[in-house]
Image (cartoon, rainbow, N blue to C red):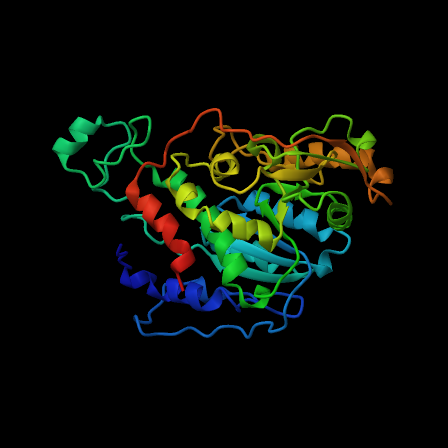
Amino acid sequence: MRFRIYKRKVFILTLVVLACGFAFWSSGKQKKADVFAKEPEAGRGSRPQATPGLRRPYNETQAEKVVHNRPEYLKLLVESLRKVKGIENILLIFSHDYWSPEINQVVASVNFCQVLQIFFPFSIQLYPHEFPGNDPKDCPRDIPKKDALKLGCINAEYPDSFGHYREARFSQTKHHWWWKLHFVWERVKVLKDHSGLVLLIEEDHYLSPDFYHVLKMMESLKSEQCPECDILSLGTYSHTGYSSKVNKVEVKVWKSTEHNMGMAMYRETYQKLIQCTDIFCTYDDYNWDWSLQYLTVNCLPTFWKVMMSEAPRIFHAGDCGMHHKKACMPSSQKAKIESVLQSSSNQLFPKMLFVNKKQPAGGLSPHVKNGGWGDIRDHELCKSYPRLQ
């Protein structure tokens, strides 16, 4: 498959490719990357300068977060991270599918831990008028296949399970998630021999001050009581009875609708996942989490077990975005979350964790696939990420 690159994009994409492994590093405070601020004049052969990188292996916990285009939530996330005890021990990786001066300014404000920015190289922003963006020759979403064939649009042969054609803004989410998972584990040079956890968070998450403390305790508890656990989860969608649960975890079957927030995994779990690339990339669901749910019963060697914190240390602050139509109100969500944390402040940073429930593992299949992922071009691009250099 061949992807054309517009001349005006070359400088940005080249910087992405060169810089991802080792740029934007500092000993604590990130240098501002203002090279994106104006249209480049350089031609295809220009090579931007990369900031010298950290060369030593990094074996502390990595927090990897996906950044889309909601700077108001990103500011909240950074604000919450700033209050975390032990945050200086974390390498924070921002994975972007959208670049803007406002987002970059928020990232540049992070001066409490080491930071790395990586950029999804097949974003809609880079390819606005061709695949994997919106090609004007693509089929309209709701056109019947017989009419699409008559029209001769590019992807007429490949509607999804419900007869709909691809929408780039939905397809991009699954692409970005799979690409950054591979890139962080395989292409970030300083993590080449990383044997610790990678924690996955989103731009609309809000972290408690003791999240790092609890994550390290869960890591120890896993080795002692649940070595077979594949995932540690710090986020849940329920805040009921928060103060009575702050020192409790439970072990159960991983379920995408309950355990997709604040997932932490080791390289071993990632390596099992990457063996399922073909199935993940062809399963007709544009949601990465429902696609993972399918893998747990149709590809992975065993059902996933998750150890989850009963009182969440990662909260979902987003009340708008891809799955919501209402206006964003980050300040309102922040107030609700901080109220929960404040009411339980004297019980945060527990001295011990207890396994409250341990349920036998049994596979859970997705109740239905959601479609949106029938286009063979999406399949092939998704499968290509492990081969990209």
Q: Is residue 237 above or below residue 18?
A: above
Residue shown at 67%/31% (left/top)? 360
Q: Is residue 197 above or below residue 379?
A: below
Q: Residue furthest front?
A: 301
Q: State the image coordinates of residue 218 (x, y, percent, origin top left).
A: 75, 46
Residue shown at 54%/58% (left/top)? 185
Q: State the image coordinates of residue 158 (x, y, percent, origin top left).
A: 26, 36
Q: How many discs mark residues in the rendered view?
A: 0
Residue 124 shows up from this direction: no
- Left or right, residue 169 beside residue 328: left
Q: The C terminus lies in which quarter of the figure?
A: bottom left
Q: State the image coordinates of residue 68 (x, y, percent, origin top left).
A: 49, 46
Q: The N terminus lies in which quarter of the figure?
A: bottom left
- Left or right, residue 90 beside residue 181: right
Kindly indicate the quadrant of the structure image that contains residue 173. top left
Kindly indicate the quadrant of the structure image that contains residue 35. bottom left
